[in-house]
Structures are given as structure tokens and as C-alpha cells.
């Protein structure tokens, strides 16, 4: 089955700096890669996703890149703000109705 | 967003009790999921239902019993649970295949005494 590794597990950045979270996956058939943000005590929410026919996608301060050959994808957050503090999960999906999540990255933005 | 509603939000039960978790989605989705979220572990997929039919049982112990009477409602029946089952149980829904975004509920925080 699919295996998704995510790092770092924790990340602290100064407000205004950039943050990068990286994930690797094992199943070359995976074709959908969402990122979820989970604030403390709240539900995970989709913040951005990318499909295998695209190499990069951007939405304001958030961008995701995908390297299918190397089987890795990354989340980039620029100009970080305190409200970006949360746990971020990457995921990969290739099979029918099955999504595999990474372990999560706890991001702390220091004002 | 109130698209996916879970009840109760918190549940404390003894190992011999029987209880049920409920999930309801108002998004018109056809797929519903149960996940277990424990500290320092990835989200663990437990069950998947598509158009009321179970399509995935991820080696979950039989003390967890899912029920999906229709595409909008999903239950997780609990009996004879163990302390290690204490976790946040999240319900999610999506439209169609796994290559669609999932919408999560707020979860039920379950504590087993």
C-alpha cells in the first residue's frame, strides 16, 4: 500500500519568514495530493491540492510543488502570520476511495 | 462550515459500555469516512462507504462496527473498547473518488476509562 512520509514534525519560524514542509510517497499510481490544516481543537480543512498532471499550484501565500519522478511534494507558505500556526497534513491518493496521510507538521509562527 | 456534523463532541465510557457516534453530512456527497486521530500518529483510515456500501475496512477490530443507512448518515457503534481506543474520531465526506477533497467534521473526543 501507499506510504507517506512527512517532515519536519515541528517547525518554528519568525513572522514574515517562509515555511516549507516536505512529503514523499511510495505509490507511483498516486495522482492526487491534498494538504490539510488543522488548528488546535478544530477540524482538518483543505488548504490546497495538486494533481499529478500539474507541477506547481499557487494560492496567494500558499504554494505546492510536485515532483513525480522523485515522488515528493512540498508545501510552501510565504510571509507567515501567527494565524498560520497549526498542524499541517499532507496526503496522497491513488487507489479507489483510499487516502494516506502523513504524520503531520506542527508549525509555530513566532510574532 | 457546518457541512459535516458529528455528535457527541465528547464521550467518556467504560470498557463494558455500548455507545454510538453519529455523523451527518449536508453536502450531497456520496462517500463517507471514519478516521481515528491519535497523538503523534498519522490520521488512520478506518472505514469507507460509497453510496451506502462499505468499500474499505482497514483491519479495524470488530469492537468498532460501522453503519451507513444512507449517503448522508454514518454511525460508528462501539462496544467493549480498550483504553488504547481513546482518541479523536473524525468523520469526513467527499464527492466520488479518493481524488476529491474531503470535508471533515469536528470529531468526537472519546475517552475509555
Image (cartoon, helix red, strand yellow):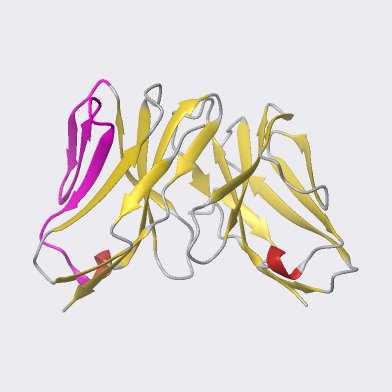
The answer to whether A65 is drawn above or below residue A103 in the figure is above
Q: Is residue A45 visible?
A: yes
Q: Examine the image and state in which quarter residue A20 appears.
A: bottom left
Screen quadrant of the C terminus of chain B: bottom right
Q: Which residue is drawn at 35% across and 35% down?
A: A33
The answer to whether A101 is drawn above or below residue A31 in the figure is below
The answer to whether A90 is drawn above or below residue A39 in the figure is above
Q: Does the magenta stretch include residue A72?
A: yes
Q: Which residue is drawn at 28% across and 59% down?
A: A8
The picture places residue B71, in percent across and down from the top left corner, at 69, 33
Q: Examine the image and state in which quarter residue A27 appears.
A: top left
Q: Examine the image and state in which quarter residue A83 appears.
A: bottom left
The picture places residue B47, in percent across and down from the top left corner, at 67, 40
Q: Is residue B8 visible?
A: no
Left or right: B5, with A34 as reference point: right
- How many numbered discs sit on the rendered protein? 0
Range of residues picked out in magenta? A53-82
Left or right: A108, with B27 as reference point: left
Q: Does the magenta stretch include residue A21?
A: no
Amino acid at each position: 500500500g501507499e506510504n507517506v512520509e512527512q517532515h519536519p514534525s515541528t517547525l518554528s519560524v519568525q513572522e514574515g519568514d517562509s515555511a516549507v514542509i516536505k512529503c514523499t510517497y511510495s505509490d507511483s499510481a498516486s495522482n492526487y495530493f491534498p494538504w490539510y490544516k488543522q488548528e488546535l481543537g478544530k477540524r482538518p480543512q483543505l488548504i490546497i491540492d495538486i494533481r499529478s498532471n500539474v507541477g506547481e499550484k499557487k494560492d496567494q501565500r500558499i504554494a505546492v510543488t510536485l515532483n513525480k519522478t522523485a515522488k515528493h511534494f512540498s508545501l510552501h507558505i510565504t510571509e507567515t502570520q501567527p494565524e498560520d500556526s497549526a498542524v499541517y497534513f499532507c496526503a496522497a491518493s491513488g487507489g479507489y476511495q483510499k487516502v494516506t496521510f502523513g504524520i503531520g507538521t506542527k508549525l509555530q509562527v513566532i510574532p | 462550515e457546518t457541512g459535516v456534523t458529528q455528535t457527541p463532541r465528547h464521550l467518556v465510557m467504560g470498557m463494558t459500555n455500548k455507545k454510538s457516534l453519529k455523523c451527518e453530512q449536508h453536502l450531497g456527497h456520496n462517500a463517507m469516512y471514519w478516521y481515528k486521530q491519535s497523538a503523534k500518529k498519522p490520521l488512520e483510515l478506518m472505514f469507507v462507504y460509497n453510496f451506502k456500501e462499505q468499500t474499505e475496512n482497514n483491519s479495524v477490530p470488530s469492537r468498532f462496527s460501522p453503519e451507513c443507512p444512507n449517503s448522508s448518515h454514518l454511525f460508528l457503534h462501539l462496544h467493549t473498547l480498550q483504553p488504547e481506543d481513546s482518541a479523536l474520531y473524525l468523520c469526513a465526506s467527499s464527492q466520488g473518488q479518493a481524488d476529491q477533497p474531503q470535508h471533515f467534521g469536528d470529531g468526537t473526543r472519546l475517552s475509555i476509562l
